[in-house]
Image (cartoon, rainbow, N blue to C red):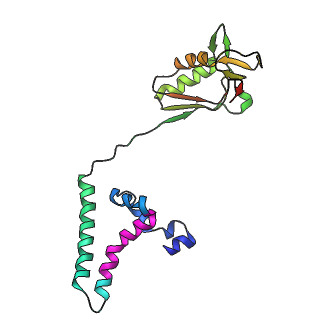
Amino acid sequence: MLLRMVFGGFYFGMLGDAATHVPLFMVFSTLGGEALVSFLVALPAVLAVEALLVHRVRAYIAAGAIIGMLLGGGLLLRHYFYAPSPVVQTFSVVSIQVGAREKAAFGASVHNTFSFPDLADRLHEAASGIPDLIVYPFSPVEGAIYRGNKDDFNRSVLAVPEAEFGAWLHGQVPGPTIVMTWNALYTDHTFF
């Protein structure tokens, strides 16, 4: 443990690194971290060796160490054979890249309907595999999306109502997919 604290790194890793998949040891990691788990992994072996090396071997020390190792081994075997397999869930992310910021196109609101054919094509392509999240790292509009009524202040900057953009976006991707865009939002006289 001292080498790990002084030098750090993988090669001086503690025994606790090898026990991360054992739920029994993870309970103790919340109390004392990796150091306590390493101590608990090494303790039965140290007690057994100590009992064997001491000239005046005490039977109860040796028996306790051996019982501790057998009990620990039995718990590990029980875990491997009877514990339910963890459910593996994946989270898929698709990032739409258009190259440089200068090459990004923008959508517009025409007669209270948002339109952005280029992004619609890219969203349909990205959503074909039904990902959990689609990231479009640019603003879909040149200006800000606004919530509520269009304010007199910076009227030319406020491009599209949030509800209008949301309604358009809802029709572009399947229901469980979330779309994240990078855009400015104007609400309550403040830009976010």
Asked if the stretch drawn in magenta spans residue 114, the answer is no
What x and y, as percent, mark residue 41? 36, 69
Q: Position of residue 177 (x, y in %)?
A: 48, 27
- Extreme-top residue of the structure: 111
Position of residue 133 in the picture relative to residue 96 (left or right):
left
* Residue 21 higher or lower than 182, as above or below: below
Does 138 sit above or below residue 7? Answer: above
Instruction: Give the quarter of the image for residue 36.
Output: bottom left
From the viewer's side, name the closer residue of 172 and 111: 111
State how many labels appear. 0
The answer to whether residue 102 is left or right of residue 4 is: right
| Residue found 72% across the figure and 23% down from its top | 143
Residue 156 lies in what quarter of the image? top right
Q: Which residue is rendered at x = 22% and y = 84% of the image? A: 59
Name which residue lies at 67% across and 17% down.
Answer: 160
- Magenta span includes 37: yes
Question: What kind of secondary structure does the magenta stretch mostly adopt?
Answer: helix
Residue 159 % position (x, y): 70, 18
Image quadrant where residue 188 sits = top right
Q: Quadrant of the C terminus?
A: top right
Q: Nearer the viewer, residue 99 or 157?
A: 157
Residue at the (63%, 14%) spot, across then down: 114
Q: Is residue 39 above or below residue 190?
A: below
Q: Residue furthest front?
A: 188
Residue 191: percent from the left, percent from the top?
Answer: 71, 28
The span shown in magenta is: 32-49
